[in-house]
C-alpha cells in the first residue's frame, strides 16, 4: 500500500506523521512539484494538503483508490474522481475541538490584548505608561456562520463565557439547541459583536463575506475566519479594517497560502494572524487523531468497504 501525502511539512512533522502509519505501508511525504508527479503514478491513496486533485492530476494516477482530505475538500474535483472509480472522503468533525479552541483563543487574545501586552512586557517598557483598552466577553453576541461540528463547539464554548449566540446555516434542517438562536445572514452580520465563519468553501460560499457584508457589520465588530480563505474577499476585508468599518480580525486562513510576505494583513495593528494551524493541536501540521482516522479509512477501502465520511458514491 503506497500512501502519498502532498504538502509543506517540517522534518519533525514528517517523522510524526510517518510513525502513525503501519510499518509495512509505503508512506511518501513530498511538497507539490516534480517529485510528487513521480509518485502519483503508483500510489493507491493520496492525502492532498496543498494541491488540487483535478482531471490533470488524476490522469496520471493509474492506481488511485482513495482521495482522503481533512475537513475541507474544496481542492478536490469529486465528480472527476467518481468518473474514475476513486473514493473521496473527508475527516469532517475530527478537528472540531481543536478549531473551536483556537477560535476562543483568538477571541480572548483580541479582547484581552494579549499580543500587545506581551510585546509591551518583552520590550521592558515602563508599566506606568501602559495605555490600552480591553473588554469582557460576557453579554457580547457572537454570530456563527455555519452550525456544523465546529460551529456547535464554538457555540458551546461561548455559552460558558455568558455570550449570546446567533447562528446562520444554509441548510434549513439545522436545528438549534435552545441556547443558539437561528437567524438570517443579514441579521447575523448586522447585530453580532463577533462574526465567526465555519462553512466549507464551495460555489455558494465563495467570497460570501465581501464589501457588502462588511458594510452591514457594526464598526465594533470582530471578524474571525478559521474556515477557508476563499470565503472572504481579502481586499474588501483589508479595506474594511483600514477604513474602520469593523474593529478587527483574527485570521487563520487566507486567499493565498502561505500568506504572501508582502500582504498588508501582516502590518495591520488590529489583526491577529496564525498560519493555518487552528486544526493542528499536536504541533504544526500534525494532528494524530486526524491521521488515525485516515488510517482507518484507508484500511476500509483496502478491504473493499466504503470509507467513512465519504463524499461520493461508487
Image (cartoon, rainbow, N blue to C red):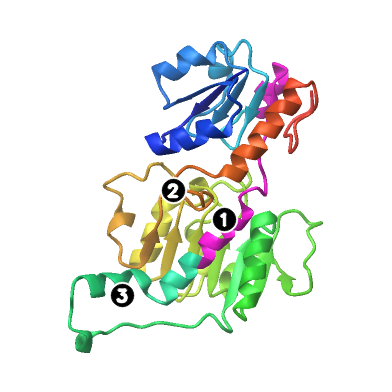
Q: Is residue 83 magenta?
A: yes
Quarter placement of the C terminus: top right
Quarter placement of the N terminus: top right
Q: Is residue 166 above or below residue 200?
A: below
The residue that mark 3 highlights is: 117
Q: Is residue 97 above or below residue 158?
A: above
Closest to the camera, between mark 3 and mark 2, is 3
Closest to the camera, between mark 1 and mark 2, is 1
- What's the CA distance linking mark 3 and mark 2? 26 Å
Is residue 90 visible to the viewer in this orientation of the structure?
A: no
Mark sitting earlier along the chain (1/2): 1
> In the rendered picture of this protein, how many numbered marks are placed on residues?
3
Is residue 101 visible to the viewer in this orientation of the structure?
A: yes
- Which stretch is magenta? 78-104
Rendered residue at 71%/68% (across/down) = 183
Judged left or right of residue 36, residue 91 is right
The residue that mark 2 highlights is: 254
Foreground residue among 4 and 62: 4
The residue that mark 1 highlights is: 98
Q: Are marks 3 and 2 in contact (CB under 8 Å)?
A: no
Judged left or right of residue 70, residue 237 is left
Rendered residue at 57%/43% (across/down) = 288
- What's the CA distance linking mark 1 and mark 3? 25 Å
Amino acid at each position: 500500500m503506497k500512501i502519498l501525502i502532498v504538502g509543506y511539512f517540517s522534518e519533525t512533522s514528517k517523522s510524526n506523521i510517518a510513525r502513525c502509519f503501519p510499518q509495512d505501508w509505503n508512506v511518501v511525504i513530498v511538497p507539490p512539484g516534480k517529485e510528487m508527479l513521480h509518485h502519483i503514478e503508483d500510489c493507491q491513496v493520496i492525502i492532498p494538503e496543498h494541491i488540487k486533485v483535478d482531471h490533470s492530476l488524476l490522469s496520471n494516477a493509474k492506481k488511485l483508490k482513495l482521495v482522503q482530505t481533512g475537513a475541507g475538500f474544496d481542492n478536490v474535483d469529486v465528480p472527476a474522481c467518481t468518473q474514475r472509480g476513486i473514493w473521496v472522503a473527508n475527516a469532517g468533525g475530527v478537528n472540531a475541538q481543536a478549531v473551536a479552541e483556537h477560535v476562543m483563543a483568538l477571541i480572548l487574545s483580541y479582547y484581552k490584548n494579549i499580543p500587545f501586552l506581551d510585546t509591551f512586557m518583552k520590550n521592558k517598557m515602563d508599566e506606568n505608561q501602559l495605555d490600552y483598552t480591553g473588554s469582557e466577553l460576557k453579554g457580547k453576541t457572537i454570530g456563527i456562520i455555519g452550525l456544523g461540528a465546529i460551529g456547535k463547539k464554538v457555540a458551546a464554548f461561548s455559552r460558558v463565557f455568558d455570550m449570546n449566540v446567533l447562528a446562520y446555516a444554509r441548510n434549513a434542517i439545522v436545528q438549534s439547541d435552545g441556547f443558539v438562536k437561528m437567524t438570517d445572514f443579514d441579521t447575523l452580520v448586522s447585530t453580532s459583536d463577533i462574526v465567526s465563519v465555519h462553512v466549507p468553501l464551495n460555489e455558494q460560499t465563495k467570497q460570501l463575506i465581501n464589501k457588502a457584508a462588511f458594510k452591514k457589520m457594526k464598526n465594533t465588530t470582530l471578524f474571525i475566519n478559521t474556515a477557508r480563505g476563499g470565503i472572504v474577499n481579502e481586499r474588501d476585508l483589508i479595506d474594511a479594517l483600514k477604513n474602520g468599518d469593523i474593529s478587527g480580525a483574527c485570521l487563520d486562513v487566507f486567499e493565498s497560502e502561505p500568506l504572501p510576505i508582502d500582504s498588508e494583513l501582516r502590518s495591520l495593528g488590529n489583526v491577529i494572524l496564525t498560519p493555518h494551524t487552528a486544526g493542528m493541536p499536536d504541533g504544526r501540521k500534525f494532528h494524530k487523531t486526524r491521521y488515525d482516522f485516515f488510517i482507518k479509512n484507508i484500511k476500509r477501502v483496502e478491504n473493499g468497504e466504503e470509507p467513512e465520511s465519504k463524499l461520493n458514491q461508487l
